[in-house]
Amino acid sequence: MAQEQLHFASDYQEGAHPRILQRLIDTNLMQTPGYGTDEICESARARIREACAAPQAAVHFLTGGTQTNAIVIKAVLQPYQGVVSAVSGHVSVHEAGAIEAGGHKVMTIPSESGKISAAAVEQFVADYEGDDNKAHMVMPGMVYLSQPNEFGVLYSLEELTAISNVCRRHHLPLFLDGARLAYALACPENDVSLADIARLCDVFYIGGTKCGALLGEAVVLPNPDLIPHFFTIIKQNGALLAKGRVLGIQFDELFKDNLYAELCKTAIDCAHRIKAALQEAGLPLCFDSQTNQIFFIIDNEKMKKLGEKAVYNFGEKYDESHSIIRFCTSWATTVENTEKLCEIIKSL
Amino acid sequence: MAQEQLHFASDYQEGAHPRILQRLIDTNLMQTPGYGTDEICESARARIREACAAPQAAVHFLTGGTQTNAIVIKAVLQPYQGVVSAVSGHVSVHEAGAIEAGGHKVMTIPSESGKISAAAVEQFVADYEGDDNKAHMVMPGMVYLSQPNEFGVLYSLEELTAISNVCRRHHLPLFLDGARLAYALACPENDVSLADIARLCDVFYIGGTKCGALLGEAVVLPNPDLIPHFFTIIKQNGALLAKGRVLGIQFDELFKDNLYAELCKTAIDCAHRIKAALQEAGLPLCFDSQTNQIFFIIDNEKMKKLGEKAVYNFGEKYDESHSIIRFCTSWATTVENTEKLCEIIKSL
Amino acid sequence: MAQEQLHFASDYQEGAHPRILQRLIDTNLMQTPGYGTDEICESARARIREACAAPQAAVHFLTGGTQTNAIVIKAVLQPYQGVVSAVSGHVSVHEAGAIEAGGHKVMTIPSESGKISAAAVEQFVADYEGDDNKAHMVMPGMVYLSQPNEFGVLYSLEELTAISNVCRRHHLPLFLDGARLAYALACPENDVSLADIARLCDVFYIGGTKCGALLGEAVVLPNPDLIPHFFTIIKQNGALLAKGRVLGIQFDELFKDNLYAELCKTAIDCAHRIKAALQEAGLPLCFDSQTNQIFFIIDNEKMKKLGEKAVYNFGEKYDESHSIIRFCTSWATTVENTEKLCEIIKSL
Amino acid sequence: MAQEQLHFASDYQEGAHPRILQRLIDTNLMQTPGYGTDEICESARARIREACAAPQAAVHFLTGGTQTNAIVIKAVLQPYQGVVSAVSGHVSVHEAGAIEAGGHKVMTIPSESGKISAAAVEQFVADYEGDDNKAHMVMPGMVYLSQPNEFGVLYSLEELTAISNVCRRHHLPLFLDGARLAYALACPENDVSLADIARLCDVFYIGGTKCGALLGEAVVLPNPDLIPHFFTIIKQNGALLAKGRVLGIQFDELFKDNLYAELCKTAIDCAHRIKAALQEAGLPLCFDSQTNQIFFIIDNEKMKKLGEKAVYNFGEKYDESHSIIRFCTSWATTVENTEKLCEIIKSL
């Protein structure tokens, strides 16, 4: 039965951090105005601004990642512009065409381990600018990346700074998707702080759904002028919650007492244990991920055996007899279950 | 101060019915698959199908009203079609252009007390069909109404049946917006059941946000063939929650033990008390609303005085010295506070 | 047979002014670069800039009216904005939803004889600005009108100036649709010159299709900064002709030797004759049109009789026994045929 | 100076076949109804149906290639679907994002010399169908190719038949872009007739702009049911010409007396001469093109020298010292000028 299996398929399988549920109970009969104009949302915004060292930032709460990516991109781009992304970027492959539905091309550039580089962005822009036919082509209008990226890999501060520099030289807003940002912040290897992100990016979001909230993503605009009338845009795109405080509660708790920075430390520790077990079992990693997603190659027979005891996420066919699959730890993962999984891995 | 005032401005000012919060706690560490494919969502769907006597219905959970209206309309219409609505219909005036952003014209028809009639739909279709230039015009592609309507007024079963008949004769899907449906169901005057709606409409939604849920609207397609691939459409439009079970929990509780049908009875009782007080105070009602929204005309001086003690919703200017304002009771409204409000009204 | 009838149904029933055809022949084997970058287009642009006394203006050639209206509106508006128009404005009723397909609401305001007024625009903006819920509503983003308007009626210089002043005070770009502009310019009553339009409007187009060209509309942006990257926008919207010179030829001829200003004088003269005949026959005019469109009310029996001898354009039902129909003269209308039509009218 | 140079940059540099100009003159004062409902358009449609052996086909006239591609794709696809194309397909790279502006992803598959294969389509569909997450992805909804393709290369009847078979097995409409179809039909190597195309494809267009018309593309729907209400869709997308007969004239002439099949024979002959000259000069071809586009690799120094005497189309950088450039013959190209070009090539 499913409940006897160990679940390591994704980081949105549990509910929310208990403090969030408690806050929902504590505030339940408070009467607040709607649409995120309430005091709880204001408090959450203030905490986020402080954590990002971005006192002027606008903060908007949306409900999920695809929605946030689609709306931010649509709001930043002009109709004749596209968004530059890694081929493997989430907006390129996993949004069911949401970006294109908003009218924009995803302009893919080469990447390594899912990371784009300042040089690749520079080259792409140079190719466009140098093209005689550029007026017949989509203009690159912003750059998208995620931290950690689609494969759980981190950008270093040096890398992110270099990309930011290229973007600013070419007046391309830089958008950082932080759906799993708490997992980056919890990594010992990570040297990119929230304040760095707020300084280097033009718009980014702090993930809630995969990081201990029931739902919610907090979009941060260090300079609010980047997107005028964002409130109306959010409404028009069906992303404005009437009971906006539900989202405010998530982030007011996540950003109280440093919770967001601490929340995922166990998840990272557990991911390291799993990587060690995979190594011991001779199952090669696909990417040198520092965060909570572990992609590895496995013989199909072993995969079948593994599947009897643990729930993983299938990636794709690697070759005729091997597959790429993913384990994912979460803010709710326990060391105990992780140790059980490690034993299973070693026994394959 | 705000907290000393009586709040009767809207029905989304409180949190959720306590049973919903309890369920969130009880299920918090359950591990479920994402995107509404979990067992809680399945249970909620089964309960809704049963309540609607629509065993074949597809049920999808979205997060809010504007989102639901925009996505359903976009999914049902062909690009060259528009949606027929009352001038005062929610999709016509209060969605920040969400319907047009999806590419469709809202085609307005006359209404009385916010209600459209079978005759008005028939006439509109006849005018279109009889127009020599119809190929140069937007084709009516579906009909939208809400129960209760924008002014809290109910369609009778006879009226809804007549509209449904016209729609079916012209192959126009009929879409019922039930953002406040629980308030309709709680009315003694109401003779339209969920099963009637499922029988007479082609797509409708059961409101959660304004009816005791933290958030959520349940779209019901009695015949799922009306919108193929609706799951992907929801995803593409940024409306698919990763932790879909959060929505499933809302509706699984609301549809357990007849809660949805009972939940708003006090709200209706309180609305009747307020109407009686307004009548006693000589403040004329704008519409003969049977539900929880009460629109009335008030002298601006009295409005100012009222505003010191109670929070209402401003409608619009009536004439130089009068305004139209709205009181709104909710599933969380108490008789005690209502009585206080009635005293204030009478003392104006 | 059709060829025996007199055709007064519309102003796009004939081909083009002979000079345009001659120029097509003269230039046929010239080899020019594509997409409107050729010398003929440049010459046409220079002539239009001169005629408009707008030396800095950008001039773009598109192929038809719906296309031009849709693209200009989409290019000027932000996604959360709508276009303000008379209820009877062409963009409101006769574009098959092209404006909405571009994502924008047509926000209708009251009009008289199809003309909007500065006061009505002012009121509409004031209502929006004063609405507590304006962030939930579509923002007025530009104003649309046509000269002559949908019913052939002219704006006076005073009226246009007043509207322009309101628009500039509220930073609303003013867009003038000049699909039939040559008919306005040919009217003795007209006191609005091309230079006035270029001074008072932010974007407008000079109609070719209905004014002696095979096809084509010339969009003029007195200040090109209003729409950056308009070339790419035109391309993206499928409106860029590879053989752009075909359009350049139309306007290079129309703006040579004052042709555009002279071209429609006979049409206006003929329209006056028809109006006089209608008056004599006791058929009341619907609007006091100064240009080439004449809307009048006719008994259905007479309409039937008329239809045996002349082709008109059916407008709409007036009452049970009367209809509104339109005669339209064109740049190619002859006095001879007009006199025949007048005889028919008088004999009804 | 430019006029002394030989022009081989593209096939839309001249006007139109003289018969088309003559027809414009002959019909100039005919009065016809608008929007393509006239007798000339009807005649052109009848000729095209006959040439395609598709008696039931619907034929619609649009003005240009980007417009036609964008509208056909938007009209065929559901919002959640994308169009499958070669990476090098015109819709993928040269439409300024027109397809995405219509809301759809261009889903690229591998190609050889710009040609997709039945196997590549089959594989792409299989990958999609086999993906556990397919409901989160864009669904392939149609297949796009052009004949000749972007590099002037022809699909054989066998290849096109195989692709058609795969498409029909998977219910994917097959769309053939025939912007340069006359050049394919004029090739001795070509074994795909118009009737074959009408039999194997679900929608295609016959290019006019690049094939001797002033402007215009004829969309053919062998089974009109594929796109209901296409007239209104064309109007809504701003592609309906008021003087539709201008387009009808182009195609009525092109399809009279077998002109369309004969028109480009000289262009093909001239292209062969140029290819021979390039070979003699040791300038390698990039693709084995059978039609009027010749892509070849040239040393940058020679390119500069060539540019003084002939106008070519720049493709892209090949390596540090070489470029890829294109010569293009047209229906108006003369053997005399071609021989001059060949001499220049040989003398480089």
Image (cartoon, coloured by chain):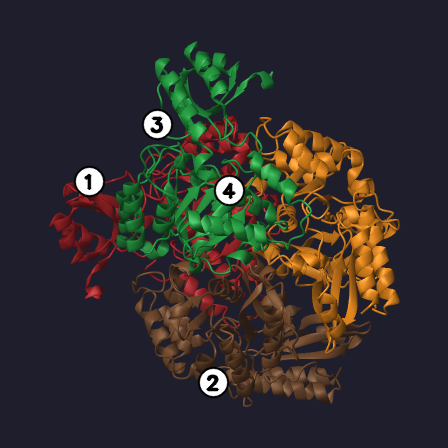
Chain colours: A orange, B green, C red, D brown
Provide residue A146's location: percent of width, then percent of height: 75, 52
| Alpha-carbon span between mark 1 and mark 2 | 59 Å
| Alpha-carbon span between mark 2 and mark 4 | 51 Å
Q: Chain of mark 1?
A: C
- The front one of C152 and D142 is D142
Q: Secondary structure at mark 2?
A: loop
Which numbered dot is residue A284? Answer: none
Residue bearing mark 3: B287
Which marked residue is nearer to the observer: mark 2 or mark 4?
4
| Alpha-carbon span between mark 1 and mark 3 | 41 Å
| Alpha-carbon span between mark 1 and mark 4 | 47 Å
Q: Secondary structure at mark 3?
A: loop
Residue bearing mark 4: B66
Residue A248 visible in this rendered orientation of the protein: yes
Provide residue C314's location: percent of width, then percent of height: 25, 51
Q: Secondary structure at mark 1?
A: loop
**Are labels 4 and 3 assigned to the same chain?**
yes
Which numbered dot is residue D193? Answer: 2
- The front one of C265 and A121 is A121
Check disc 1: other Cα within 10 Å, few if <14, some if 14-19, many if 20+.
some
Residue bearing mark 1: C284
C-beta proximity under 8 Å, tags 1 and 4: no
| Amino acid type assigned to the residue bearing label 2 in the image | Ser
Placement of the N terminus of chain C among the 4 image quadrants: bottom left
Which marked residue is nearer to the observer: mark 2 or mark 3?
3
**Are labels 1 and 3 assigned to the same chain?**
no
Check disc 3: other Cα within 10 Å, few if <14, some if 14-19, many if 20+.
some
Which marked residue is nearer to the observer: mark 1 or mark 3?
3
